Image: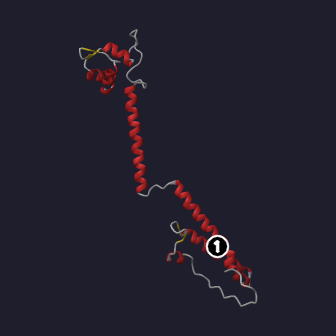
Amino acid sequence: MSQSEYARQRGRARSLISRYVKQGRIVLVKGKVDVEKADVVLGFVSDGGVNKKGSDDKNDDGDNYWKEKARREAAEASLKELDLAERRKELVEVDLVAHEFSKMVDAVRQQLLSIPTKISPTVKSAKSIAEIHRLIEQSIHEALNDFGTYNANTGKPRASRASSKNRGPSKKVKARPKTKSKRVGK
């Protein structure tokens, strides 16, 4: 029986049979495969003639080759899909997102920590608790609005007319009366 015919009948790759012939594991007689000896080498029958394993055994080199090749091709296809998704900007690296989020949180923290310095001169001149509450609340909303319009490239809030329109009508605060006290803030 020829090498191709033997490989086809046993469900093995022609290249596996050729490799075994070159290694001397399968013996050729007058250019043809010695079927009985080849079956022993491939494990279809044991030396005693009892069927040892079938063609669907997972430990065979031929099957492992094709399974490994399929696994490798699937992995390569997955990597190409990830690369494509990244180029389409559908996928972002986790480290980059964590870094940008950290920058954004730092900017918001700084903005919130600056509120007392900004509004303390105005609060001092406020005449009622309600006015103080409104001033503090307005400053907090401005800081949070800046958080909503954060620009990752600059690390600062985006300057946009839409964001100022969304703040609602701003109530003008009366200028504080001049006092003899020292200046607070910048």
Asked whether, in this view, residue 82 is left or right of residue 29, the answer is: right
Q: Quadrant of the N terminus?
A: top left
Against 160, residue 50 (above or below) is: above
- Number of residues whose C-alpha sits closer than 10 Å to that of mark 1, classed few (under 14), some (14–19) or many (20 or more): some
Q: Secondary structure at mark 1?
A: helix
**Total of numbered circles in the picture?**
1
Against 87, residue 162 (above or below) is: below
Asked whether, in this view, residue 66 is left or right of residue 114, the answer is: left
The residue under the point 59% across, 61% down is 102
The residue under the point 39% across, 48% down is 80
Q: Residue furthest right?
A: 180
Looking at the picture, how far across and down is residue 90, in whole percent? 44, 56
The residue under the point 74% across, 90% down is 179
Q: Is residue 91 visible?
A: yes
Looking at the picture, how far across and down is residue 95, in whole percent? 54, 55
Asked whether, in this view, residue 47 is left or right of residue 145, the answer is: left
Asked whether, in this view, residue 173 is left or right of residue 58, the answer is: right
Q: Is residue 11 visible?
A: no
Q: Quadrant of the C terminus?
A: bottom right
Q: Residue furthest front?
A: 23
Q: Residue furthest top?
A: 48
- The residue under label 1 is 140
Against 78, residue 161 (above or below) is: below
Q: Quadrant of residue 148?
A: bottom right
Type of amino acid under label 1: Ile
Looking at the picture, how far across and down is residue 88, in whole percent? 40, 57
Looking at the picture, how far across and down is residue 72, in whole percent? 40, 38
Q: What is the basis of the colouring in this image?
A: secondary structure
